[in-house]
Image: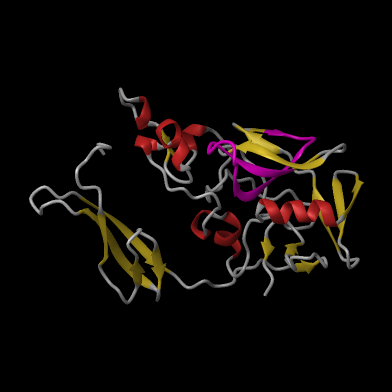
């Protein structure tokens, strides 16, 4: 800022190149466990240059799969493996833990005020409010905090509760993986559960979990996050929605508390 600034180039530097590298676009890659500082600078004359820094910690990707959790091969064309239970659940019928999209914190209340990827700055400028991550360029001026945009449309590991909680190869499924599950499997409802049978005869159970807005749990509809931001608006992401009548994907506000059924990709 401002948008008509004469010099708009940025330079990224990492304090310890053994710990992490950073490319010309600011993409940080962990190399070995440890701590480092990434600094971004404007390339103006040194006297007028501006900079910001970010502390990073690189950790080993250890497998934290809970006891009893299995990766089930349903015989899907993509070879995606589906977990036999939700994040936070102790059985296949358990709801587990709800999360806001991209927010790894466990909480009992789901509002925009406590959504970690939204900043509501008290400022005269309306654009000071907005999302601080996962904002497309087209919506930067209306939805991004201070016109912020990163162009990201799929959750990165650090914002994915499935990966953060379980580690290893687990992650929240993409919209495409969920739609494959809907199309290629046979869904049979039994009580508050769906039995999902794959092409090879193997199956998993997915409960109609509900969703949380504020501190209230709304039942009757199962709401499961995908890792994919909505194509229509950066303020919503796609979910798998289950009811006794419908099984489909649709958009849902990012601050809503939905549940997560992790997957692993083809080895």
Percent coordinates x, y for residue 33 in the rendering? 40, 74
Residue lying furthest left? 47
In terms of depth relative to the viewer, which is nearer, 16 or 62? 16
Percent x, y of residue 246: 84, 39
Which residue is at a point 80% across and 48% down the rendered structure image? 207
Write down the region rendered in magenta.
217-240
Residue 180 location (% of width, % of height) = 77, 55
Residue 185 coordinates in the image, percent (x, y): 86, 56
Q: Is residue 123 left or right of residue 103?
A: left
Quadrant location, the C terminus? bottom right
- Quadrant location of the N terminus? top left
Say whether residue 35 is left or right of residue 197. left
For residue 180, above or below residue 127: below
Q: Residue at x 59, y 41 (%)?
A: 231
Q: On the image, which quarter does residue 172 sit in?
A: bottom right
Residue in view at x 68 percent, y 59 percent: 262
Residue occupying the point 54% across, 33% down: 111
């Amino acid at each position: 800022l401002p948008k008509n600034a004469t010099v708009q180039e940025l330079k990224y530097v990492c304090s310890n190149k053994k710990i992490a590298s950073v490319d010309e676009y600011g993409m940080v890659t962990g190399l070995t466990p440890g701590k480092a500082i990434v600094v971004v600078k404007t390339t103006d004359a040194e006297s007028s240059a501006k900079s910001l820094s970010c502390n990073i910690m690189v950790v080993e990707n250890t497998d934290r799969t809970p006891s009893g959790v299995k990766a089930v091969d349903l015989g899907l064309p993509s070879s995606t493996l589906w977990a036999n239970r939700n994040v936070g659940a102790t059985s296949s019928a358990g709801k587990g833990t709800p999360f806001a999209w991209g927010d790894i914190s466990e909480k009992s209340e789901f509002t925009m005020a406590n959504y970690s990827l939204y900043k509501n700055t008290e400022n005269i400028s309306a654009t000071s409010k907005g999302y601080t991550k996962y904002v497309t360029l087209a919506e930067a001026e209306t939805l991004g905090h201070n016109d912020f945009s990163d162009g990201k449309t799929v959750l990165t590991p650090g914002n994915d509760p499935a990966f953060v909680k379980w580690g290893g190869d687990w992650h929240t499924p993409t919209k495409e993986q969920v739609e494959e599950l809907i199309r290629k499997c046979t869904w049979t409802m039994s009580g508050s559960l769906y039995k999902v049978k794959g092409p090879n005869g193997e199956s998993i159970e997915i409960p109609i979990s509900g969703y949380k807005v504020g501190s209230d749990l709304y039942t009757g509809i199962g709401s499961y996050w995908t890792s994919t931001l909505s194509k229509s608006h950066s303020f919503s992401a796609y979910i798998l929605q289950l009811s006794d009548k419908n099984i489909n994907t649709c958009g849902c506000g990012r601050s809503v508390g939905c549940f997560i059924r992790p997957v692993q990709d083809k080895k």
